């Protein structure tokens, strides 16, 4: 039946997008356990390691905006396929880096390629009706969660048992495999009549999105939430290593808890919750829940309590992310999906770039509690911004009308 074939084809394309994001996140997570060792091997100290973390997000900030707008011009498929190959090159260079400078360039390349998330989200928006977009974005969120679990596990085991070259080469191989599967299955999702040519390096679209009343709260949320969460991920290892003597193993299991909760919530629960409450309510709950959980960490007196507070933090983050993506895609017009989603991801990458610097400053200047309280307060500011958001159902009706 033609209808059944169309549904099957749509599911296949969603599956490829899921795998694309999953491999991106696995590749990102694979290098996390060995990145500090790589940096130290080349004589880099704290600031050198921090620069490797910063440059990835900084390049992602630039590329999300660029690739989102470029996908509105040339289509989603060529952007996705090209960035898969760029990713493979970046991870190969990472594996064989002979110096800190080459390692830095490898992180620049991988950071740029990771900006394809805006094109992936736009692809999902293209092939799903407005009422289904939040759940489609939930699929991408599940890929984030699963990748966040598998990446560090694969990286740690491969680095330990197969040697330092293995993690980077595995990530590169996954990107190549993804390229061939996507080139076979993915059809272009953006019709020619819906394409729009806009200046590629004009970041005015971020200001334009902020100027639009229905988008402003979401753009602020897309900055504040990653800013706060990235700050938390910097302050946490410093705190638990000092307070409880944690090492890489304990931190690794903490990230596994976060990723596992995200995979379950976004893969199985989010759609059911969103149908009952709407994406706006989940967005608000997620932001305030994350803010409270982050602020509570320095008051957790045992390792068990740290793990315990991680569960509501991961749950709140898992309902926030797909709700935020789905709402942006609903409010954006058909011809600007890539641009607006790219603006949102650019704000997120900017937050992830600045958050670690702010957390490091707060940790040194205000102490451990100050760093977590700052991150929690910034997350709460994002929650207050989200209260200004109009109900998603009304916006959907307005756009469809």
Image (tube, rainbow, N blue to C red):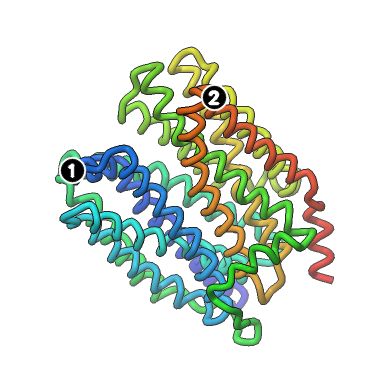
Q: Toward the viewer: 382 or 270?
A: 382
Q: What residue sits 50% from the left and 59% below the top?
A: 61
- 1 or 2: tag closer to the N-terminus: 1
Q: Which residue is mark 2?
A: 309
**Residue 157, relative to residue 86: is it above or below?**
above
Q: Residue furthest top?
A: 301
Label 2 secondary element = helix
Q: Is residue 13 visible?
A: yes
Q: What residue sits 52% from the left and 42% below the top?
A: 355
Residue 34 appears left or right of 375: left
Rendered location of residue 88, percent (x, y): 30, 64
**Neighbourhood count class around disc 2 (C-alpha, 10 Å): few under 14, some 14–19, many 20 upward:** some
Residue 335 circle label: none
Instruction: Give the quarter of the image for residue 193.
Output: bottom right
Q: Is residue 8 visible?
A: no
Rendered location of residue 74, percent (x, y): 52, 82
Judge depth for marks 1 and 2 and give the one in front: 1
Q: Residue furthest bottom?
A: 193
Q: Toward the viewer: 183 or 295?
A: 295
Q: What residue sits 34% from the left and 18% below the top?
A: 245
Cβ–Cβ below 8 Å for labels 1 and 2?
no
**Neighbourhood count class around disc 1 (C-alpha, 10 Å): few under 14, some 14–19, many 20 upward:** few
Residue 41 circle label: 1
Rendered location of residue 133, percent (x, y): 65, 60
């Amino acid at each position: 039946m033609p209808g059944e074939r169309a549904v099957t084809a749509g599911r296949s394309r969603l599956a490829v997008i899921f795998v694309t994001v999953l491999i991106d996140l696995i590749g990102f997570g694979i290098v996390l356990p060995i990145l500090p060792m790589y940096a130290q091997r080349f004589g880099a100290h704290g600031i050198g390691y921090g620069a490797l973390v910063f440059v990835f997000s900084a390049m992602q900030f630039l590329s999300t905006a660029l690739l989102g707008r470029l996908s509105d011009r040339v289509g989603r498929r060529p952007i996705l396929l090209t960035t898969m190959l760029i990713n493979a090159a970046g991870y190969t260079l990472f594996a064989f880096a002979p110096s800190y400078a080459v390692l830095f360039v490898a992180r620049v390349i991988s950071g740029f390629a990771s900006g394809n998330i805006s094109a992936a989200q736009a692809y999902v928006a293209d092939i799903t009706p407005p009422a289904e977009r939040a759940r489609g974005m939930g699929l991408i969120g599940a890929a984030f969660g699963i990748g966040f679990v598998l990446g560090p596990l694969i990286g740690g085991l491969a680095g330990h048992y197969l040697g330092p070259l293995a993690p980077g080469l595995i990530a590169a191989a996954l990107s190549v495999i993804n390229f061939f599967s996507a080139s076979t299955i993915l059809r272009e999702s953006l019709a020619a009549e819906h394409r729009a040519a806009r200046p590629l390096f004009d970041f005015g679209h971020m200001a334009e999105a902020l100027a639009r009343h229905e988008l402003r709260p979401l753009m602020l949320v897309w900055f504040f939430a990653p800013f706060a969460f990235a700050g938390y991920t910097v302050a946490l290892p410093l705190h638990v290593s000092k307070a409880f003597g944690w090492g890489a193993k304990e931190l690794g299991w903490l990230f596994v808890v976060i990723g596992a909760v995200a995979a379950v919530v976004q893969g199985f629960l989010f759609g059911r919750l969103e149908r009952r409450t709407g994406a706006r309510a989940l967005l608000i709950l997620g932001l305030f829940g994350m803010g409270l959980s982050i602020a509570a960490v320095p008051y957790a007196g045992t390792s068990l309590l740290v793990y315990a507070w991680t569960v509501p933090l991961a749950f709140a983050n898992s309902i926030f992310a797909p709700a935020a993506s789905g709402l942006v895609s609903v409010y954006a017009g058909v011809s600007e999906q890539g641009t607006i989603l790219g603006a949102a991801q650019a704000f997120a990458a900017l937050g992830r770039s600045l958050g670690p610097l702010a957390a490091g400053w707060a940790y040194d200047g205000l102490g451990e509690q100050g760093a977590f309280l700052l991150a929690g307060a910034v997350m709460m500011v994002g929650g207050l911004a989200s209260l200004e958001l109009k109900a998603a159902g009304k916006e959907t009706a307005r756009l469809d009308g």
